[in-house]
Amino acid sequence: MEKNNKHAPRRRKKCVVCKTTFIPRFNTFQKTCNEAKCVLVYMQGEKAKNERKAMAQMRERVKTPSQWRNELQTLFNRWVRLRDKDKGCISCGKPLVGKYDAGHFYSVGAYPSLRYHPDNCHGQCTLCNQHLHGNLLEYHERLIVRIGAERCDALRLARRQYMRLSIGEIKEAIKMYKTKIKQLDGGKH
């Protein structure tokens, strides 16, 4: 019966800097060949990567609530556009091609509690959203068809509720919409 060799020969690896093959001298996680210049280049790259990561964490720590809400709004609008891209404009029904908006039925300014409500925001052509101020009569008619009268009534009642998201809740929503975007976008971004 053969004994298991504790020190099996290490496999050849490719240096991440110079691309030559080498046998790791120190451990199997070694990334570079044994040349000092490759080790230095790699370490400088790691240091820069760590500095960028630390800077990003610092920027995240000093973000204002307004900046967090804006980030969430951007992701939410992107998700709405992806969700509704094949449904046509909620107001006029024209196909959504090129640039189009995520138009709110109840405005964000008047009803901030519905800012991120998925039933309150739908794909809308820029003509209807920006130039016809939402084209709300047609929006309402198509909204009933799209989500049903029951959900429209629930949305109408929800507009009177007060909602203020904490930073933690906003971060969770950001994470959720990033995941949803990835799913709808086929893993891109």
Image (tube, grey):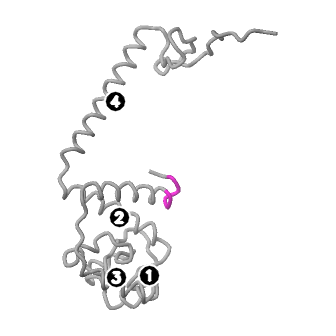
**What residue is rendered at 45% in x and 8% in y?**
35
Q: Is residue 186 above or below residue 127?
A: above
**What residue is rendered at 32% in x and 91% in y?**
137
User: Along the polypeptide, which appears first: circle 2 or circle 4?
Assistant: 4
Circle 2/circle 4 CB separation < 8 Å:
no
Q: On the rendered image, what quadrant is the N terminus found in?
A: top right
Q: Is residue 184 above or below residue 94?
A: above
CA gap, disc 2 and disc 4: 29 Å
Residue that carries the numbered disc 1 in the rendered image: 94
Residue type marked 3: Leu
User: Along the polypeptide, which appears first: circle 3 or circle 2?
Assistant: 2
Residue that carries the numbered disc 2 in the rendered image: 76
Q: Which numbered disc covers residue 155?
A: 3
- Dot 1: few (<14), some (14–19), or many (≥20) neighbours within 10 Å? few
**What residue is rendered at 29% in x and 63% in y?**
73
Q: Is residue 1 above or below residue 147?
A: above
Q: Quadrant of residue 124?
A: bottom left
CA gap, disc 3 and disc 2: 17 Å
Q: Nearer the viewer, mark 1 or mark 4?
A: 4
Query: In the image, which residues are magenta?
Result: 183-187
Residue that carries the numbered disc 4 in the rendered image: 49
Q: Nearer the viewer, mark 3 or mark 1?
A: 3
Q: Position of residue 30 (x, y in %)?
A: 49, 17
Residue type marked 4: Lys
CA gap, disc 1 and disc 4: 46 Å
Q: Nearer the viewer, mark 3 or mark 2?
A: 3
Q: Quadrant of residue 96?
A: bottom left
Q: Position of residue 185 (x, y in %)?
A: 49, 58
User: Along the polypeptide, which appears first: circle 3 or circle 1?
Assistant: 1
